[in-house]
Image (tube, grey):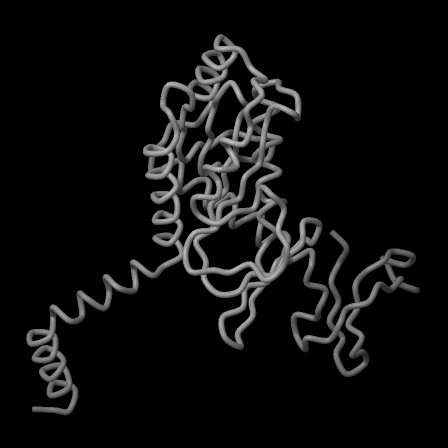
C-alpha cells in the first residue's frame, strides 16, 4: 500500500471515529459567525418587543427590505405607533465600544485588539431617510434607535438613542406625545407591507450582494495605494503622447515602480 492510500485510510478512520466532534465544531463555528450573531441580536429585540410593547399601540415589522435608487436597504425592525415611527438598528457585539455621534467610524476593542466599524447612526440614517421618503413623513415623526446586545460596554458618552438591550424599550416608551392619528398608523402599516420587497432568501441574498458591491466600491475609492508595491499614489499629468494633458494616478515609488492607474 502506497503512502497516499495509508493517509486516506487514516483520515477515514479518524472521521469515522470522531464524526460527531467534527459536526460539533462546524456547528459552533456557524453559531459564532457574523450572520448568526446578527440573527440572535434581532431575535432578542423581537422577543423584547413582543413582551414589553403593547400590540394594541405598537406594530412591529421585522427585516424590512425597501427598494432604493441604487438597489435596496434592509431595516432590522420598524415599530409603528401614534407616537412615531421607530427605525431600529441592532448590533450584537462584545468588548469596549468607543464612538461619537459625528464620527464616521467607531472602534471595538477586545483586550488589545482594536477594529473599526461604520458609525451605526450613519448606517441607520439611510434607513430612516429611505423610510421617511417612502411614507412622505416629516422628520419629527421618524426616530432612529441603535441597540447593542451582547457583552459590550460603552467607553464614551452615547446619544440617548444609542442604548443597550432593553434600553430601546425605554426610549420608545419615553415618546408620549401623539404625532400620528390612528388612521395614519393604519395607512403607514399598509404602505410598509405593500412597499417592502417580498421577505425571502432570494431577497436577502440579492441585498447582501448589493451591500458587498457598495463596500468594495467604497474601499476602492478610499484605497489610494499602489496595487503593486503599496506606496501612495499621487495625481500626475501626462506631458507627452496621446494622453498629453490628461491626469492619472502614478506611484510615488517611481522610477523604481512605474505603476499607473487611470482616473475613473
Residue at horizontal 69 percent and vertical 55 percent from the top: 221
In the picture, measured across the screen, residue 217 lies left or right of residue 110, that is: right
Nearest the viewer among 122 and 209 is 122
Whether residue 115 sits left or right of residue 227 in the image: it is left
Residue 8 versus residue 176 in the image, above or below: below
Residue 87 locus on image (x, y percent): 52, 33
| Quarter of the image where the N terminus is located | bottom left
Q: Residue at x 42, y 24 (%)?
A: 58
- Residue drawn at x 36%, y 47% is 39
User: Residue 190 location in percent, x, y?
Assistant: 44, 15
The percent position of residue 118, horizontal first and vertical second, equals 59, 53
The percent position of residue 75, horizontal first and vertical second, equals 48, 36
Q: Nearer the viewer, residue 100 or 244?
A: 100
Which residue reaches farthest top? 183
**Residue nearer the viewer, 32 or 259:** 32
Above/below status of 253 relative to 97: below
Q: Along the horizontal axis of the image, is 125 left or right of 13?
A: right
The answer to whether residue 192 is above or below residue 226 is above
Residue at horizontal 62%, vertical 38%? 125
Total of numbered circles in the picture? 0
Amino acid at each position: 500500500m502506497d503512502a497516499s492510500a495509508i493517509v486516506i485510510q487514516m483520515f477515514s478512520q479518524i472521521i469515522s471515529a470522531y464524526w460527531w466532534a467534527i459536526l460539533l465544531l462546524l456547528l459552533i463555528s456557524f453559531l459564532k459567525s457574523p450572520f448568526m450573531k446578527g440573527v440572535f441580536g434581532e431575535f432578542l429585540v423581537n422577543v423584547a418587543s413582543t413582551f414589553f410593547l403593547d400590540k394594541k399601540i405598537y406594530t412591529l415589522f421585522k427585516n424590512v427590505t425597501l427598494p432604493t435608487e441604487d438597489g435596496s436597504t434592509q431595516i432590522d425592525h420598524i415599530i409603528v405607533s401614534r407616537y412615531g415611527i421607530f427605525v431600529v438598528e441592532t448590533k450584537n457585539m462584545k468588548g469596549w465600544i468607543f464612538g461619537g455621534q459625528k464620527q464616521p467610524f467607531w472602534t471595538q476593542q477586545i483586550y488589545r485588539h482594536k477594529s473599526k466599524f461604520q458609525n451605526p447612526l450613519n448606517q441607520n440614517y439611510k434607513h430612516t431617510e429611505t423610510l421617511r421618503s417612502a411614507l412622505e413623513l416629516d422628520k419629527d415623526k421618524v426616530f432612529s434607535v441603535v441597540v447593542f446586545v451582547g457583552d459590550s460596554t460603552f467607553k464614551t458618552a452615547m446619544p440617548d438613542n444609542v442604548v443597550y438591550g432593553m434600553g430601546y424599550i425605554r426610549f420608545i416608551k419615553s415618546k408620549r406625545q401623539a404625532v400620528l392619528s390612528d388612521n395614519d398608523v393604519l395607512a403607514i402599516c399598509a404602505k410598509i407591507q405593500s412597499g417592502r420587497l417580498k421577505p425571502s432568501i432570494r431577497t436577502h441574498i440579492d441585498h447582501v450582494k448589493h451591500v458587498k458591491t457598495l463596500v468594495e466600491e467604497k474601499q476602492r475609492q478610499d484605497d489610494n495605494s499602489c496595487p503593486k508595491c503599496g506606496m501612495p499614489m499621487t495625481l500626475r499629468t501626462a506631458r507627452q503622447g496621446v494622453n498629453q494633458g490628461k491626469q492619472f494616478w502614478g506611484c510615488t515609488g517611481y522610477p523604481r515602480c512605474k505603476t499607473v492607474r487611470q482616473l475613473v
